[in-house]
Image (cartoon, rainbow, N blue to C red):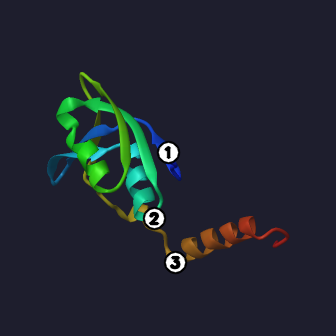
Amino acid sequence: MKNYDVLCIGNYTKDTIISPSGIKVVDGGAVNYAAHAAARLGTKAVVVTHLAKEDDHVVEKFTQSGIDCFVTYTPTSTLLKLEYQPLTLTSAHFLSPRQLARLLQRKSRMLTPGLQ
């Protein structure tokens, strides 16, 4: 029986990202990101997930990274659509130096007990 340091259980997601620069499809999901991060930190990670057979390249990526993967194949993978709108800034989005100083002073009081 193998021993693991980290067990990641969850959905692989096929993310469609829509932004002003275009549309792209990427491999996503917390299980995907967590397992790869754990492996890069030198731990022995294992993934339990489900995905469509057409997304089997994800299992290959886990394996190439030294991550064991136990997968259940389903008719479709979990799909996520993320839409990012263009950022429009106005002067209302900025603090004056005085406003920033007041904000930092209040935060400092909140973080330092007994400071009045």
84 or 75, nearer to the observer: 75
Where is mark 1, residue-wise? 7
Q: What element carries label 1?
A: strand
Q: Which amino acid does label 1 sit on?
A: Leu
Q: Which amino acid does label 3 sit on?
A: Pro
Q: Determine whether 20 is above or below 116 in the image.
A: above
Counting from the top left corner in percent of width and height, residue 46 is at 43, 46
Where is mark 3, residue-wise? 97
What distance separates the C-alpha of mark 1 from that of mark 2?
14 Å
First in residue order: circle 1 vs circle 2: 1
15 or 42, nearer to the observer: 42
Q: Which amino acid does label 2 sit on?
A: Leu
Q: Is residue 102 left or right of residue 7?
A: right
Q: What element carries label 2?
A: loop
Tell me which residue sits at (22%, 38%) in the image.
56
What distance separates the C-alpha of mark 2 from that of mark 3?
40 Å
Q: Is mark 3 on a helix, strand or loop?
A: helix
**Mark 2 neighbour class, 10 Å CA radius: few under 14, some 14 to 19, many 20 or more:** few
Q: Looking at the rendering, in which quadrant would you find the C terminus?
A: bottom right
Counting from the top left corner in percent of width and height, residue 105 is at 67, 73
Tell me which residue sits at (29%, 41%) in the image.
82
Tell me which residue sits at (45%, 64%) in the image.
42
Where is mark 2, residue-wise? 41
